[in-house]
C-alpha cells in the first residue's frame, strides 16, 4: 500500500539514473537503491537474475543477506519466473513453498523483468516485515519501473 506519488518520484529517479545505460547490473543496483530508500515498508529490495535455464541467482539488492539461488517454480520468485506475471503476497506463511530467507518476512511482491526481446531476465522482489504491505497499486508502480530497465538488457 504505497502512495502513487511515491512511485512517480521513484520512476523519475530511476529514469534519470539509468538514462542511456547499457549495463544491467548497474541499472538493477540503482533501481534497488531508489526503491529501498523510497519504500519504508521494505525490509529487502532486490533482484534475482536468470542465470541458467530455470534457475535464479541473487543480483543487486539492499537489505540482509538472502538465499543465493532459487529454482523456477520454488517460492514466490520462482513462481513469478515460471509464470511471467507479478505476484502480490499479503501473507507469506499462506503461500505454499515460500522460500524463507528472512524469518521476519510477512509479505512480499515480485515483478518480472524482461529484455527488449521479451525474454525473462530477472525478477524484482520486495519483502516486508509488515503483513499486507503491498497491493495492486504497488504492482502497477513497480511494473512501470521495471519497464524502464528493459533497454538496459539489450545485448
Ligand atoms: N521469499 C522469496 C525468496 C527470496 S527472499 O525473500 C529475498 C520467495 O519465496 O521467493
Image (cartoon, rainbow, N blue to C red):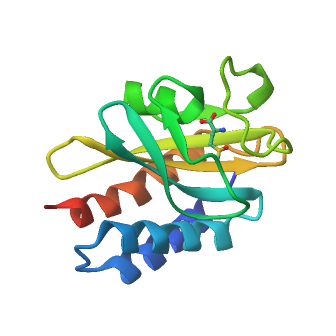
Name the side, left or right, on which 128 lies relative to 57: right
Q: Position of residue 128 (x, y in %)?
A: 76, 49
- Please tell me how many numbered marks the rendered image carries: 0
82 or 53, nearer to the observer: 53
Q: Position of residue 125 (x, y in %)?
A: 57, 48
Name the side, left or right, on which 52 lies relative to 22: right
Q: Position of residue 39 (x, y in %)?
A: 69, 64
Q: Residue at x 68, y 44 (%)?
A: 134
Can I make out residue 91 in this image?
Answer: no
Q: Quadrant of residue 89?
A: top right
Q: Is residue 86 above or below residue 128?
A: above
12 or 47, nearer to the observer: 47
Q: Position of residue 153 (x, y in %)?
A: 24, 60
Name the outermost residue toward the top: 96
Q: Residue at x 39, y 26 (%)?
A: 82
Q: Is residue 95 above or below residue 17?
A: above
Query: Can you say which quadrant of the picture contains the C terminus?
Result: bottom left
Q: Is residue 16 above or below residue 88?
A: below
Q: Is residue 27 above or below residue 137?
A: below
58 or 145, nearer to the observer: 58
71 or 105, nearer to the observer: 71
Q: Residue at x 29, y 80 (%)?
A: 19
Name the quarter showing ligand 1. top right
Q: Residue at x 48, y 23 (%)?
A: 73
Name the side, left or right, on which 50 lies relative to 36: left
Amino acid at each position: 500500500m504505497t502512495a502513487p506519488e511515491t512511485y512517480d518520484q521513484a520512476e523519475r529517479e530511476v529514469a534519470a539514473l539509468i538514462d542511456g545505460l547499457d549495463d544491467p547490473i548497474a541499472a538493477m543496483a540503482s533501481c534497488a537503491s531508489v526503491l529501498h530508500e523510497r519504500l519504508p515498508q521494505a525490509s529487502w529490495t532486490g533482484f534475482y537474475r536468470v542465470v541458467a535455464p530455470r534457475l535464479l541467482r541473487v543480483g543487486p539488492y539492499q537489505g540482509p543477506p538472502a538465499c543465493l539461488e532459487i529454482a523456477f517454480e520454488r517460492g514466490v520468485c520462482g513462481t513469478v519466473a515460471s509464470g511471467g506475471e507479478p505476484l502480490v503476497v499479503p501473507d507469506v506463511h499462506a503461500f505454499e513453498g515460500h522460500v524463507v530467507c528472512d524469518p521476519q518476512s510477512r509479505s512480499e511482491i515480485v515483478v518480472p523483468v524482461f529484455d527488449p526481446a521479451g525474454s525473462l531476465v530477472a525478477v524484482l522482489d520486495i519483502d516486508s516485515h509488515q503483513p499486507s504491505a503491498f497491493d495492486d497499486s504497488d504492482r502497477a508502480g513497480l511494473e512501470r519501473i521495471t519497464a524502464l530497465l528493459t533497454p538496459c538488457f539489450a545485448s
